[in-house]
Amino acid sequence: MPATEFDAIVLGAGAAGLMCAAVAGARGRRVLLLDHADAVGKKILISGGGRCNFTNVNTVPDRFISANPHFAKSALARYTPADFIALVERHGIAYHEKTLGQLFCDGSAKQIVAMLLEEAAKAGVDVRTGQPVNDVTHTDGKFTVRFGDQHFTAPALVIATGGPSIPKMGATGFAYDLARQFGLKVVEPRPALVPLTLGGDDVLFRELSGIAAPVEARAGKAAFREAALFTHRGLSGPAILQVSSYWRHGEPVTIDLLPDAPSGWLLEAKRARPRIPLRAALGALIPDRLAETLAERLALPGELGAQTDRKLADAEARLAGWIFRPNGTEGFAKAEVTVGGISTANLSSQTMMAKTVPNLYAVGEAVDVTGWLGGYNFQWAWASGNAAGQVI
């Protein structure tokens, strides 16, 4: 069967692939967009609780993790949150800012997918879904893709198939296999923006499942001040998801359980209300069950007035730097994104093209660039997809 020819083939109809295909098509390129799933944009649809946290107005390069922290600068500078917001507004999609610069649709994430599909259709992109990519080859300057039982060729190929996070949505490590096939290196992928699991001495905290509190969480040099949530398996919530991207197995996570409490607050409580126990002093600041568990761990029975200032200062310091030792994460099944991926050392930061394979590109989550929680990964998808779409 003869192959059908295009100017470019984009593998993966997620955020980055849709953006790349639409931008290239708008430049007059004949673009084929392929996805093994039965519909496009599945991860977009579930994002942000179904309302799609589509960007973050505070996007800056240092909120992205990569073996090369400078790699994302070029693409992010050339396609900004304001650019995507302008696109959203042109399509009449109402949106709002929640916290920390996060923008969400007022209605549904379906609006973002519909917008991207409309842009692709307007640009003449041929979108096909529901078949596996069985084979990809490169000979005589052309890539040939076997999609189901059909063959397509093009001089340019874009890898936009994401990472292995959320496999129930069809996510796989296909991008890495393809990259290795063409001699590109892959930075070891690991789950990111993912709940942490607790065991050993920390298992007691799993009994607090469902309790949330504002904290400051630290892993390595990274620190985030948001809510933490105790779960039946360990720790979650925005602060924990954020530090999970920086956490490495075997390392501790340090949590300030009372980030708003002033220094010396426990000694002041002793002087103001000497007859209350530690549990009551904590209960005035944090949920009762959490206060009870922490007081039990601190082992200061009796009234505050019966405790020495040194013991109370030590307890305050421990509360400000409580050390958890996670025994793992909830894995790719619960990870929102992936840290690692196709090495940026192999790619041009200007065009996203492989340095050693002309006209082979990689964009989005498939690449070793991972953003913070809160719309940053979508902005990388739009920016990297745009960068490749402008040149393929």
Image: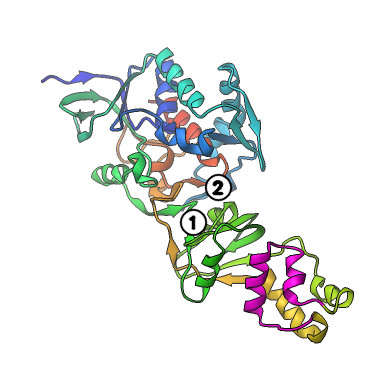
**Res 310 → quadrant:** bottom right
Find disc 2 in the rendering and name its residue. 372
**Left or right for 138, reference 331:** left
**Magenta span: helix, strand or loop, mainly?**
helix
Asked if residue 281 lies in the magenta stretch, the reply is yes
Q: Residue furthest right?
A: 272
**Res 285 → quadrant:** bottom right
Find disc 1 in the rendering and name its residue. 195
* Image quarter (top left, top right, bottom left or bottom right) of the C terminus: top left
Q: Which residue type does callout 2 highlight?
A: Trp
Q: Which residue type does callout 1 highlight?
A: Pro
On the image, the x and y values in percent for residue 69 come to 52, 50
Which residue occupies 86% across, 75% down?
273
Task: Examine the rendering and report whether any part of residue 266 can be seen.
Answer: yes
On the image, the x and y values in percent for residue 225 come to 66, 55
**Left or right for 315, reference 10:** right
On the image, the x and y values in percent for residue 254 come to 60, 67
Give the extent of the magenta segment: 276-303
**Gap between marks 1 and 2 measured at Cα:** 14 Å
State which tag comes first along the sequence, 1 or 2.
Answer: 1
On the image, the x and y values in percent for residue 341 come to 38, 48
User: Secondary structure under badge 2?
Assistant: loop
Asked if residue 349 lies in the magenta stretch, the reply is no
Residue 198 in the image: above or below residue 228: below
Q: Crowding at label 2, few (<14), some or many (≥20) Cα neighbours within 10 Å?
A: many
**Left or right for 361, reference 336:** left
User: Secondary structure under badge 1?
Assistant: loop
Residue 151 in the image: above or below residue 273: above
* Image quarter (top left, top right, bottom left or bottom right) of the N terminus: top left
Which residue occupies 37% across, 28% down?
40
Please say which color scheme the image uses. Answer: rainbow
Judging depth in this view, the residue of 23 and 243 nearest the camera is: 243
